[in-house]
Image (tube, rainbow, N blue to C red):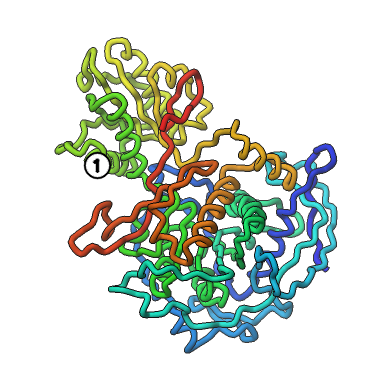
Amino acid sequence: MILVPNRQLPLNGNKLLNTMSFLLILCLFFNCGVTKNTTSTTPELDYGNGEYDPVTRNNKDDETTYTPTTVKDTEKNPVDKEEKEVVKTEPAQEKDKSEPLDGIKIETEAASKASKEDTEIEWKDIDRTKESEKDTAIVDKIKEEIEETEVAKQPSEINPEDLLGGMLSEMPIKKDVYRIAILLPFFTNKFMYPHGAIGKDSKMALEFYEGAKLAFDKLRAEGVNLSVSVFDTKGEKSTVEYLLQRSEVLNADVIIGPVTRENSRMVAEFCALNNKTIISPLNRRSDIVQQNSFYLQVNPSMETHYVNLLGHIYKRYGNGNTLIIAPEGRTGTKRVQYINSANLVAEQSASSPLQSVTIDPRSAGNIEFDISGYLVSGGNNIVIVPSSSQSFVNFVMRELSKIRDRYPMIVLGMHQWEHFDKVDYNYYENLKVHISSDFHLNKADVEYRAFKNNYYGIYGINPSENAVKGYDILLYFSRMIHKYGVYPQHHIAEESAQYFHTKFAFRSKYGGASAPDQSGAVGAYENKFVNILKFEDYQFRRVN
C-alpha cells in the first residue's frame, strides 16, 4: 500500500490530475544510494542571455573531468540489480530494505507481450485548500500499470561495419520496437511527503512528461511501437553517472535529456562512445558539444535566434543603421558578442562590429541619455536591446519613444518581452518591436484546440509551455525514428515539419561550425528555426 496526498482543485466535477501519483512513484524509484544534496535551483527555462542552464542557471565555464561509461566497460563490471547500488563519488550505502522499482516503462507497442503488474495504491485525502490554485494541482485515485521487466544487459547492437571514419553510415537501422530513455530533473528528493506541494523545480520536467504521455497515446494509434523508461536525474551529476550504468539506458536506442549543461555534456559523451542518438529537449546552450553527430539540439542557440531575427529584418526592411543598447556587465558584453557574430552571418558583407552603447542597469530610470548621435534622421534605424529586465527595457523604450518622430526606428528585443506585464505596450506598438522565440502557438488552430481540450480533460488544467513542448518533441522524433531508424539525423534536414509550438528544421554543424570545415567532420545538429514575432495591433503575431 502507498499513501498519496490528494490535492483537490475547486472545480466542478473535481477534475483531478494523476501527476502526484507519478511523482510519488518516482520517489520510490530513486531512493537508491544517491545522497548528494541538490543545490538551490530555479526551473524556468529562459534566463539572462538565454545561454544559462535551464535549471541551475550556472553560467560558469568550469570544466569537470568525467570518463563516460561504455557498454563494453559495463559488461566487464556490470551493475547487478541485487547488489548494493553505489555511486562512485559517494561512499557505499546500505540498500533500502524495500526493493525499489527500476524505472517507469510505458509500452506503446500495440501487442506488447511484456507482463505487467498493477501497483495497488490507496489514496489519502489531505486538506490543501490553502495552496495556490496555480499549483499544478489535483490528484485522484488512479491505477497505473508499471512494467517491472528488467531488460537484460546487452552489448551495443551497432555493427562496427556500420561506422565509417568515426561517423555513422546512412544505412538505416530499424527495429520492431524502439527503446527510449527519458532523463529529466523531477527533483523527487525535494518532495516532502505527506505535507509537501509539488515544487517549482519539479514542474518543468513534470509538465514536459504530461505532454509526452499524450504523445505516446497518439503514437500508439499510429502504430509506432516504443518502450519508454523515465528517470529522475535530480539535477545531480552523481545521479546521472549512476543512471548511465542502468541497463535501460545502456540498451536505449535514443536518450531524451538531461537539461543542465554539465549533465547534458556527460550524456552526450556517453552517447558518442556508445553510438546512441541523444535529443537535448530544453537546453539552448551552444557550447555543450562540438563534433558529435549523435547530439540533436531542439532549442535554437542565442546566436541562431539573432541570425534569424536580423536576417528577417534586413530582408524585410533593408540593412539600416544598427545600434545595440545593452546593460553594462558580463551578461551584456556576452550578448553583444552573440549579436555581432550573428550579424556576420545575417548580413554576410559585414566586416566590423556593430556600434553599441552600454548603460548601468542600476541607474536606469534615474537618468536621461542621448543616443541621437548614433542614429540617422529620416533613415532606417534598427535598435537592438538585448535585455530581459523589465525595468531596464521600460527605461530604454521610454527614452527611445521621445525621439522616434525624428529618428524612425525598429526595436529588436528578446523572447521574454512577450510575457512582460510592466512595460507600456504603446512603446511596443510605436517602436515596431520584433522578437524571436522558440515557442509560439496558434491558439485558433483546430488540432491544437483538440489537444488542449484533451489535456484539460485528463489533467484539469490547460497545457503549459513545457507540456506542449513535451508533446511536440516526442511526436516529431518518434515519427522520425519509426520512419528512418535509430539514427534519424541522416534524414533530419529533409524532414522540416511544423508542430504546435514551432517548426523543426534541423541542420548540422560541421566541426562545430555552421559550414563544412576542411576535415568535413559533422558536428552536432541544431534546430535552426525560430518564430519571428512582430508587435502589431497590440499583440505579437508571427511574421515568418
Residue farthest left in this picture: 351
Q: Which residue is drawn at 82% across and 56% down?
A: 141
Q: Position of residue 213 (x, y in %)?
A: 65, 55
Q: Residue at x 85, y 40 (%)?
A: 13
Count of labels in the image:
1
Tell me if residue 171 comes above or below residue 397 in the rendering: below
* Badge 1 density bin: few <14, some 14–19, many ≥20, Cα 10 Å: some
Q: In which quarter of the image is residue 544?
A: top left
Asked if residue 491 shows in the view, the reply is yes
Nearer to the camera, 382 or 293: 293
Using residue 507 as the reference point, say whether residue 246 is left or right of it: right
Q: Which amino acid does label 1 sit on?
A: Val
Tell me if residue 498 comes above or below residue 513 in the rendering: above
Q: Quadrant of residue 409?
A: top left
Q: Where is residue 342 in the image (x, y as percent from the top left)?
A: 27, 41
Q: Position of residue 341 (x, y in %)?
A: 25, 43
Q: Which residue is drawn at 77% across and 72% down?
A: 117
Q: Residue at x 48, y 24 (%)?
A: 423
Q: Position of residue 126 (x, y in %)?
A: 83, 51
State the residue position of label 1: 345
Tell me the SS state at disc 1: helix
Asked if residue 201 shows in the view, the reply is no
Tell me if residue 94 comes above or below residue 252 in the rendering: below
Tell me if residue 451 comes above or below residue 242 in the rendering: above
Residue farthest top in this picture: 405
Placement of the N terminus among the 4 image quadrants: bottom right
Using residue 278 as the reference point, say whether residue 31 is left or right of it: right
